[in-house]
Image (cartoon, rainbow, N blue to C red):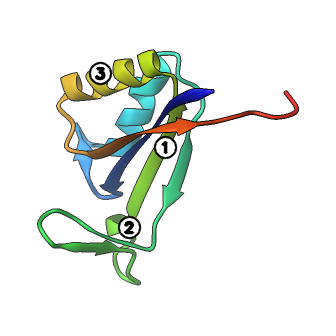
Amino acid sequence: MKGFEVIFMAPRSRRHHGKPVLDTVAGIAKSHDIKRHTRRVDAEGTGASGHTHSAHFFELADEPEELMFVLDGDKADELLRAVEEEKLHVFCIRRTIEYWEFGH
């Protein structure tokens, strides 16, 4: 199948109304009947400002995270619009992919 990989990235410490920003994205996705996602914790990442985010012994909250979805075009558009409307401070990529699910 053809679709899109949509990945949102933010440090774990970034909040939106007191809640981790990627938790907010996951909640938005769920409210749009998007059930499948993968969440990854990265060792290190550098943001647009040049600041390096990583998990330190003293500060695990700055650890970079990713929230990834594989969606058809309509659902990808719907999710991106909803996140934009919420005015979240989050980095996102969307790329065209082909995907399969075997043994289903």
Residue underneath mark 2: 63
- Tell me how far mark 2 sits from mark 3, CA to CA: 25 Å
**Mark 3: secondary structure:** helix
Q: Residue at x 36, y 35 (%)?
A: 24
How many numbered circles are shown? Answer: 3
> How many neighbours does mark 1 have within 10 angstroms: few (below 14), some (14-19), or many (20 or more)?
many
Type of amino acid at the residue the image marks with label 2: Glu
Q: Which element type, helix, strand or loop, lies under badge 2?
A: loop
* The C terminus lies in quadrant: top right
Residue type at mark 3 is: Ala
- How would you rate the neighbour count of disc 3 (Cα within 10 Å): few for under 14, some for 14-19, many for 20 or more? some
Residue 83 lies in quadrant: top left
Instruction: Kindly give the residue lying farthest to the bottom in the view shown.
Output: 57
Sort mark 2 into few (<14), some (14-19) or many (20+) by Cα contacts within 10 Å.
Answer: many
Rendered residue at 16%/62% (across/down): 48
What amino acid is at disc 1? Answer: Met
Q: Is residue 25 above or below residue 45?
A: above
Please report the residue visible at 15 percent of the width from the left and 72 percent of the height from the top. 50
Residues 33 and 102: in front is 102
The mark nearer the N terminus, 2 or 1, is 2
For the view shown, which residue lies furthest in the right direction?
103
Estimate the x, y position of residue 46 in percent, counting from the top left. 26, 70
Is 61 situated above or below 36? Answer: below
Q: Answer left or right for 37 relative to 96.
A: right
**Residue 56 image position (x, y, % from top left):** 38, 81
Q: Which residue was labeled with disc 1?
A: 68
Kindly identify which residue carries mark 3: 82
The answer to the question of whether label 1 and label 3 lie on touching residues, with beta carbons closer than 8 A, is no
Q: Position of residue 30 (x, y in %)?
A: 49, 23
Report x, y in % for residue 47: 21, 64
Q: Secondary structure at mark 1?
A: strand
